[in-house]
Image (tube, grey):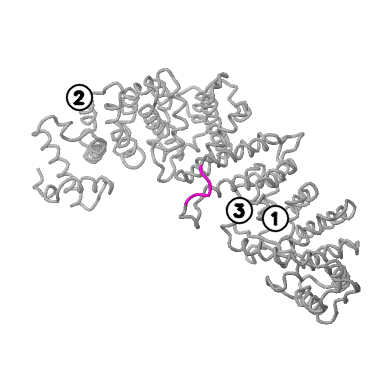
Amino acid sequence: MIEPRLRAQNAYLVEMDRRIGLAKRVTEQQWYPSARAAVAAYLVGLLEALVEVPKNDVSHAVQMYSDATEVPTSSNADAPWPFEFAAQVRLALSEHQESEVLGPAHWVIGMGLMDALVRRQRGADDVWNVAHLASAIDVRIFAFNEAFQELDESPMRFVVEAIGVLASWEREHAARYAPRERRDGLPAALAAWANETDFGAIWDMRAWAGFDMYSDELGFLGVMCAERSAELLPVVESIGVPPLLESVLQSPSITMDMDRILALLDRAPPLLDPTTGRWNHKVAAGYLLKVAFEYVLNLGRPDRSNEDRPHAQEQELRALIGPIVTHTLDRTDGVPMLVRWLRHLVWRVGNHPDDEVLNNVFDATLDALAGSSQPLGDIYVFPTSAALAAGALVPQLAETEAELLYQNLIVAIMLREKQLEAGSSSTIPALRNAFRDLLRRGRHPFLNSYNERVGSWRYSVFATLYASETEPATTWKDDFDAFALERRASLHWSYTDDRTLTAPGLFLAGVGVALLDQCIMADDPHLRAKASPVWTEVFNATLPYFTHWTLDQGPWRSVGTSLFARLPACTTSGNASLGLSLVRESLKQVGGDETMFVTAMANLDNNGMTIATLAGDSTVEAATIARIASFLRWEASTGNRNLSDAVVQYWENKWPPDALQAPII
């Protein structure tokens, strides 16, 4: 059933439904059957007249025919149809805009086009012209579809074959639908698509950037396919040009009806060759999986007509995800398709980490997959060779291969966590070993993204590998130490021309911060007690880098400030106490790095460990305040500010303006 909440958001569709409802009332008239038969006969003559007409001249030829040819009058004396209706049919044929007044005539034309196509039995000659006329007006499309549903098996088979001819013609002449400035590039895009081996490109679509393509003549096919998927989905697949094919499957008759989406997904041709396991360049199943998830995402988006409240709450969205996963896994290609889709979601979540609806849908998908008891070995191919030893830089995997393994590993780790939450007791695979192996052989996916927050969601995923260890601090430190060579080489990466050398150390530092968060917020008191040793190990391991004279800006600096921001929680949340003396000692280790000291003090103070608490007496407190104020004034006077605006604003809001104007000590 069409989801009314989604339908109501689109004013055009609401109005279209109203017009179709009004137009269809013509079928209640006693004279309707005779009018339909007469219009079908009239259209038989029109189709004959159009056989030799060039495609670009069809509209003009239709106008000429309707001007010169009368619609046959009613031959049914018992139910004569109004003379003015014949005039409306002729007028409607040349009409290119929706019209409520002409709606009944458009409905009869739509039905009559199907009747004429079947009567003439010249599918190859007529199908493009029929499609052109039927798709011109929404009412005609739905009438044409209704007539199609009425057909017996033999005429339906004939119509499906004719539509197949149309799909072939559209494929061969796809350039006519491309933007004028991109038409010359279409052959190259199709050739590149033919050479693509990753079916994830179905959802990526960067290969088709700029190729916004829509065929009016295919406009009816989405509506008809929604009703008769078994007959017409193979025809849709045969279109072969991804933007055109996608436009058919984007019909609201499909995208707003989850039952139809799942029915189509069940019937869509497999996208993997059963013999080789490789992508066969079928795309319908992949598009339909995307359509199913977009349906859920759209329900979770704000409703503009209801004070921007979402259409549906998280519980309803989660209930919708389960059947999508089940229907996908029931396909012969379901596991690889769903895993690849999850990789796509990993990419989307990484680009939109603050999208709450997307994150909830991703999480619900993992829950549903975990409930299916899918083996992790189907998701991530774990290394069979011995772990690569530290102490040597190894050749790197190709970026695309490393990215594939990285995304699959994230999915495997998150799925394993879901399985554990669900009470699974199966053997835990060597996920941490797989992480270290990939971090050594494929560094590129672990590079810090622009403006990426330390400890963000992807760091949290890998942090779970350490949180489950008996001694997470020691385990993390062992892995951090194992990449010492990469860190040393990263200080001189310009000599190696390999910027990825910075990735292992910095990524593990971010994982350490995320691990600290998991310890601090854990319900398990045993894990909470690990926060203090984790903080100490991560701080001591990363201190040389966030205070290094060439690395002290940017991501490494963020690691240091993030650690100080979390330090108060380690001393007050029930974990083993670090003690004030250790906090003071940590600040001393920052040395004369005033930027880090002032930033660290802001983070400590803002999170409950005040200057007064750290100072212990008023003299030390005054000296600390003076030190901070002095640096703030000095830095402002140089015009070369290293402190973040947030830190400066914090201190300016905390103290009255004159406190920062005192003489520099």
Query: x, y percentage for residue 643?
Result: 26, 45
- Rendered position, 450 above or below 9: above
Nearest to the observer: residue 475 or residue 10 = 10
Q: Which residues are magenta?
A: 309-313
User: What residue appears at the point 51 percent right and 54 percent down from the top-left corner?
Assistant: 303
Nearest to the observer: residue 150 or residue 331 = 150
- Tell me which corner region of the image, top left, top right, bottom left or bottom right, holds residue 21: bottom right
Which amino acid is tagged 1? Answer: Val
Which amino acid is tagged 3? Answer: Pro
Q: Disc 2 to disc 3, how far (Cα)?
A: 63 Å
Residue contact between numbered discs 1 and 3, judged by CB atoms under 8 Å: no
Q: Disc 1 to disc 2, how far (Cα)?
A: 68 Å
Which amino acid is tagged 2? Answer: Ser
Residue contact between numbered discs 1 and 2, judged by CB atoms under 8 Å: no
Residue on which the image places disc 1? 248
Residue 268 located left or right of residue 364:
right
Compare marks 1 and 3 and give the one earlier in the sequence.
Answer: 3
User: What residue appears at the point 25 percent right and 40 percent down from the top-left corner?
Assistant: 599
- Tell me which corner region of the image, top left, top right, bottom left or bottom right, holds residue 426: top right
Q: Disc 1 to disc 3, how far (Cα)?
A: 21 Å
- Rendered position, 183 above or below 656: below
Residue on which the image places disc 3? 4
